[in-house]
């Protein structure tokens, strides 16, 4: 058995790679569309992610190749790096730019990336490639960034170099993820708790609807505004700063203050979802997967009916899951309107699940989903022996 990535590295750079790193992708187990309302999210790192092999080249140049895109780029060392159109190597380049801006002295490197996580499907391959690059540079050049510094730096790459206005959850989860733990995280304060999440005889199935998330951005902005309107209405009588400052019981007492029916529905989702995250944390630490699964289904139903960010593709995956007794729970994950759903499936029944959900989905939607199996894995780090890809 040979190491697939070393073979690719040698093909590209005619030598062995000296250093190897891995950063996971992430899923959000529950707590959707509440990060911008001061609520709790519950992401975890998955065992799929981005591999980086890298070696010094003793030249004044950075070379980049990604096995996924099969494209190579070369750029000389300089004091300032600019975004280059829409190419993928902007992600590592943006990280390099941040290091240089902070006066870290870097030397020439040859990079080889490979992601076994679906790319562009809401599982944060972008945070994964940013964080693995930042972690590697920090390690190779003995810079003194903490893990949280690297998270903030990677988020800044996404916001300022790539130009996407996203929150900190993704970078945080791929950096701080821990095997068999979910992170109960407040994205405002960055307070978090790693909750034991022993999935027992279940695995995490990731179902990519293969539907582009076209509407996600405009609808996201619309929801942010609706939540602001709900907050303003409640502030007439309540001294609160975020919708998630109140629980379901308080909401039910004051919901009459929100006169717009749509805005009221949005607030109801946010506040009840935040309560569900708290219950989900308790269920997970008690190994109560049945209860956790029930909360996942409730979260999905609320995102479909109250928040209206699902869609027939994601609904179809969840609809099938509800008919399969070997599935504890399922829901859309991420912003919605396409992207991925997750399901907790009995490991022994995963192949059957994958086959049946594919048939059900294809019949209804007209094309196939992609189905992956994963566990809850560790955050970014040196590539471990057991993570190597053998061929
Ligand atoms: P998501 O983060 O949901 O996967 P994004 O659109 O935010 O989707 O990020 C996807 C982009 O990240 C890709 O188009 C590519 O530019 C970059 N990327 C992610 N993984 C890799 C990889 N393994 N190799 C090269 N580029 C990658
Ligand atoms: Mg992304």
Image: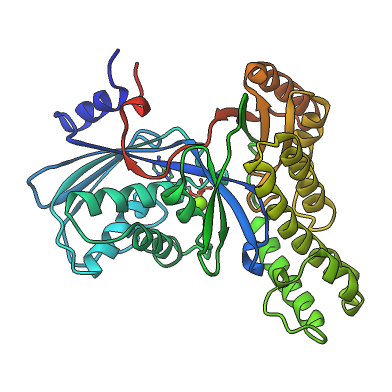
Query: Which residue is drawn at the image coordinates 22% and 31% (left, top)?
Result: 12
The single residue placed furthest to the left in the displayed view is: 58
- The quadrant in which residue 315 appears is top right
Quarter of the rendering occupied by the N terminus: top left
Q: Which residue is farthest front?
A: 286
The colour scheme of the drawn protein is: rainbow
Left or right: where does residue 33 sit relative to residue 162? right
Q: Quadrant of the C terminus?
A: top left
Residue drawn at (92%, 76%) of the image:
256
> 331 above or below 276?
above
Indicate whether 138 appears above or below 99.
above
Residue 225 shows in this picture: yes
Residue drawn at the location 70% of the way across and 29% of the way down: 367
Residue lying furthest top: 1
Q: Residue at x 27, y 63 (%)?
A: 97
> Residue 71 appears at what percent x and percent y?
33, 39
Residue 312 pos. (x, y %): 79, 41
Instruction: Count up the numbered dots.
Output: 0
Question: To which quarter of the image does residue 205 belong?
Answer: top right
Which of these two is toward me, 163 or 191? 191
Front residue (pair 227, 278): 278
- Residue 88 in view here: no
Vertical arrangement, residue 220 with respect to residue 201, above or below:
below
Q: Is 332 rendered above or below residue 191?
A: above
Return the x and y of residue 216 as percentages of the image width and height. 66, 56
For this view, does 272 lie left or right of residue 205? right
Q: Is residue 223 left or right of residue 51?
A: right
Horizontal and vertical percent position of residue 27? 57, 44
């Amino acid at each position: 058995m040979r190491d697939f990535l070393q073979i690719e590295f040698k093909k590209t750079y005619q030598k062995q790679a000296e250093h190897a790193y891995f950063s996971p992708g992430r899923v959000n187990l529950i707590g959707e569309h509440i990060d911008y309302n001061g609520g709790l999210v519950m992401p975890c790192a998955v065992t799929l992610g981005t591999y980086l092999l890298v070696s010094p080249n003793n030249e004044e140049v950075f070379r980049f190749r990604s096995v996924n895109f099969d494209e190579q780029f070369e750029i000389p060392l300089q004091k300032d790096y600019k975004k280059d159109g829409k190419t993928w190597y902007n992600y590592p380049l943006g990280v390099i730019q941040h290091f240089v801006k902070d006066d870290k002295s870097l030397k020439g490197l040859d990079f080889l990336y490979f992601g076994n996580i679906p790319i562009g499907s809401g599982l944060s391959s972008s945070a994964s490639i940013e964080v693995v690059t930042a972690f590697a540079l920090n390690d190779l050049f003995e810079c003194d960034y903490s893990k949280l510094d690297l998270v903030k730096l990677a988020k800044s790459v996404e916001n300022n170099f790539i130009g996407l206005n996203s929150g900190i959850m993704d970078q945080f989860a791929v950096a701080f993820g821990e095997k068999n733990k979910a992170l109960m995280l407040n994205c405002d304060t960055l307070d978090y708790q790693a909750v034991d999440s022993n999935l027992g005889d279940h695995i995490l199935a990731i179902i990519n609807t293969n539907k582009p998330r076209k509407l996600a951005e405009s609808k996201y902005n619309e929801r942010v505004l609706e939540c602001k309107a709900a907050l303003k209405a409640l502030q007439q009588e309540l001294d609160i700063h975020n919708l998630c400052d109140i629980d379901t019981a308080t909401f039910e007492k004051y919901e009459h203050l929100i006169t717009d029916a749509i805005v009221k529905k949005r607030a109801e989702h946010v506040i009840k979802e935040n309560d569900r995250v708290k219950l989900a944390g308790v269920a997970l630490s008690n190994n109560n997967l049945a209860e956790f699964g029930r909360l996942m289904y409730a979260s999905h139903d609320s995102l479909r009916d109250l928040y209206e960010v699902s869609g027939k593709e994601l609904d179809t995956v969840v609809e099938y899951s509800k008919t399969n007794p070997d599935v504890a729970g399922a829901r859309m994950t991420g912003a919605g309107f396409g992207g991925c759903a997750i399901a907790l499936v009995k490991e022994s029944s995963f192949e059957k699940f994958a086959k049946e959900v594919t048939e059900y989905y294809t019949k209804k939607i007209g094309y196939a989903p992609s189905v992956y199996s994963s566990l809850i894995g560790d955050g970014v780090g040196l590539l471990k022996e057991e993570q190597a890809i053998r061929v």
